Amino acid sequence: MEKNYVNLDVNPCKMCMPMGMATVLKGIKNCMTILHGSQGCSTYIRRHMATHYNEPIDIASSSLTEEGTVYGGENNLKTALLNVIKLYSPEVIGIGTTCLAETIGEDIDRIIKEVKDIEPYNKVRMITASTAGYKGTQFEGYHVAMRSIIQQLADNPVKNKKLNILVPHLTPADIRYIKEVLNDFNADYTLFPDFSETLDSGYSKEYKRIPEGGTDAKDIANMGGAKASIQLGVTVPHELSAGHYLLERFRVPLFQIPVPIGVKNTDRFIKLLSQLTGNPIPVKYKKARARALDAMIDSHKYNAQGKATLFGEPELVYSLASLCIENGIKPEVLAIGGKNVLFKKLLAPLVVKEGYNPLFLSEADFETIQQQTIIRNSNILIGSSDGKWIEEREGIPLIRVGFPVHDRIGAQRRLNVCYEGTLRLLDEITNCLIEHKHDGYRKEMYESFYKKQVCSQ
Amino acid sequence: MSSIYKKEPTDYTIIQERNKSIAKNTANNIVSITCDSDSVAGTVSQRACVYCGARVVLNPITDAYHIVHGPIGCASYTWDIRGSLSSHSEIYRNSFSTDIQEKDVIFGGEKKLEAAIAEIIEKNRVNPPKLIFVYATCIIGVIGDDIEAVCKRAEEQYGIRVIPVKSPGFAGNKKDGYKAACNSLMTLMKQSKNLQKVKGINFLGDFNLAGEMWLINNYFREIGIQVVSTFTGDACYDNLIKAPSASLNIVQCAGSMTYLAKQMQKQFEIPFIKISFFGVEDTSESLLKIARHIGDEALIKRAEKFILGIKEKTEKELLYYRKRLHNRRAAIYVGGGFKAISLIKQFNDLGMKIVIVGTQTGKAEDYEEIYKLADEGTMILDDSNPYELEKFIKETGADILVGGVKERPLAYKLGLAFCDHNHERKHPLAGYEGAINFAKEIDESINSPIWSFIKEIDSETEGIEDDVRDIFQEVYNEKIVKLMKV
């Protein structure tokens, strides 16, 4: 279905490609980011990420001005590289383009090739991605960045025993938990991008301008020799998928599975790990699964009252929808801000099988999501804090999950994955539905049934 | 709390091109600083772009449709993030973007923009728009869409005001965006340039963050000062076009609005004065200044009386905070010079010491004023960055940083208190009520119990207390001894 306005996006449910690039680069060890464009792009992205993660987000800009726009921004980019090296001493610098750089035809790969052997540029490994803001959303930017970086860094095809774990935009807490699961399976792995520490670091007496943590570029170099890749992300199209690149280029077997949110999706992940590592499922996870099932039984009648509008990036909405479906929460509106063919193709059979008939919205804005939410009579919203607009207007409660969450604290440490995270998230949803029902039922019953009558004594 | 940093020099070196924008305040105040220049690439400037400057100035106009002509990011990152309140329309809280795609970049975006304007008109027949702003972003500047022509045609076709805002991000810095916004406001007001003058003021450079404009307007009402129009806090089309009839412009946010005031002086013959409603001292002085400019003896008397009453009440409350904040060291890094100057005065009033003053877009005259007001040894920075802020916070032993959203996590990670003096604030910091809120916020952060943990962190134990048992044993000792005896 089309959005209400054809020529306008009214209240966007998407961001731009450089945002995705900036997020991925936060997942590389000792890496700094430069956005080649005007100063605003990096500052806006820094602000957006800073309020979500509550962490300092240092992203440099080549600060293109009128002169750079007319005569080329090569000098600006070179200066930016030099200054970033001086101020941050990174091992890796990731350079993303912006609308401006792409439109004026900046060839950043050529610029980098020119300087990469010269002191002091030769001290750092420079990686690039083409991320014009108008070519896609943050989702595409994220995957383009992942794929480009692996293309540039994975240069050692010698076989090794490691698993590649390719993660989409999850919370740092999610990534920490996935690493815990991998360790419990005794898996030898390279997880990329790993922003579990860099975007959620602890307080330490010594402030680090580039926070500790992140995937080591040296480990990325060996990804082509891995035993297999697990890509958490079924809606990532082949041409954007890092897993597909490793498959095509190095014949690394690829297992593309959904983000482990919901019991079924988590089962897939856990079983796959067991198969690939040859190790049995640890008791810990069997217990966690049993607890999740127990909780789902406890909550099922409350959940049956739920009529949900889900919105955000395709991968997250896909797994959130699975969670809703397996708990009897009716999906009413399933909306993504960008274009994604796989999203509906994969999700539609799932919902149809359970007898639901939700409205799929692609390239949706919140103006349309709001209107369809009212038409469909949803009673719960699940997605980023940008849904606060509908919450405020229509009084429908919002479960904040995804990016960005600007108006609540702690989005970076929310666990949503595997049995434990699924349960935490489900409890939040269920409690919201209970609260909704308990708040209103006295009045509702009174208004529906009470007729004034004389008491007979 | 006093800072965890010991006022020691660090080994951080400053990028050479940045040295001229950094100065230490000396006794004879002869230092000068380079400002109003392009940001140095790769230094992680805290500034945004031209579009950002324009957007912040015009955004609070409540019944306007703000169309961001460009790719989605520019609209997405600026959607409803600021704390400007409205007493009527909420149209301004929506984000309208032409969401430029690759094919538009190739074939041009004029047609899409035209269709977008048509759609807004078509879909809002019940409550027809009066005013549309069309912002040009980087890409529009490069692909060369003639937004002026599109806007002009739309005005003719629909009979409403459709005003271009020339704000491609790369065409200067944030300050050029202020100017672009002011030019758009001038374009809007030209239609009513011959209005009969009335005895009243326009209030320029207040954005009604957390209701600050309302709060100040209450003072005006009590004193008897009539407000014709506001720029741009809680502004609407009908009031904005009345602005040329005012007899005085008062300018608060000088960085963004002095240009508009000068233009209005030239074209509508409205004189202007600079005022500030931050801090007790500035608020009182500003009220008197306005009364003297427009009023007779009676009005001035009323102002004096009003100030006397409210000042006494405020001072009483501030006393408590002065005791708790005395001699603490404050660092300031904010957007414009006017705010920095007001903050210095407020900190001085609270008995605090200023150790750093920096702005993103201050002007030479702002810095002159800053030299005069700030203590000797104060570090003065223009268009600074996280690296320099870290260096000087450590070297000056600051206890608190005042700044915007991006500075907050830096302060916290450095173990520093923080005051949110940004456009997202949810409580007023202006006027007398705001002066108390300000002191309260400083106190709540600087005297929070959290900092005692930070100070105790020792690298070996990572701060984990190991004498917990001892404490409890001391308390229970008597009892334990007794029990042992039994």
Image (cartoon, coloured by chain):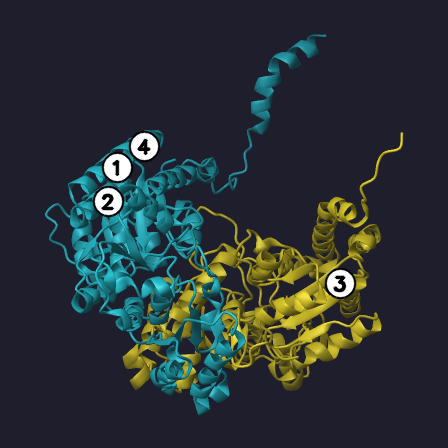
Residue B322's disc is 4
The residue to which callout 2 is attached is B287
**x, y percent for residue A316:** 66, 67
Check the rendered structure and report the hue given to chain B: cyan
Colour yellow maps to chain = A
Q: Residue at x 30, y 32 (%)?
A: B315
Check the image and report above or below for A126 versus A430.
below
**x, y percent for residue A451:** 81, 44
**x, y percent for residue B283:** 26, 43
Q: Earlier in the sequence, mark 4 or mark 2?
A: 2
Amino acid type at circle 1 is: Ile
Task: Point out the frontmost of discs 4 and 2.
Answer: 2
- Kindly identify which chain the residue marked by label 2 belongs to: B
Label 3, label 1: how far apart the Cα atoms are: 60 Å
Classify mark 2: helix, strand or loop.
helix
Q: Residue at x 55, y 81 (%)?
A: A6
Task: Point out the frontmost of discs 3 and 1.
Answer: 1
Task: Point out the frontmost of discs 3 and 2.
Answer: 2
How busy is the neighbourhood of tag 3: few (under 14 within 10 Å), some, or many (20 plus)? many
Q: Are marks 3 and 4 in contact (CB under 8 Å)?
A: no
Q: Earlier in the sequence, mark 4 or mark 1?
A: 1
Q: Are marks 3 and 4 on the same chain?
A: no
Label 4, label 1: how far apart the Cα atoms are: 21 Å
Q: Nearer the viewer, residue B215 or B171?
A: B215
Q: Are marks 4 and 1 on the same chain?
A: yes
Amino acid type at circle 4 is: Arg
Residue B307's disc is 1
Camera sees residue B106: yes
Q: Quadrant of residue B358?
A: bottom left
**x, y percent for residue B97:** 48, 75
Amino acid type at circle 2 is: Leu
- Kindly identify which chain the residue marked by label 1 belongs to: B
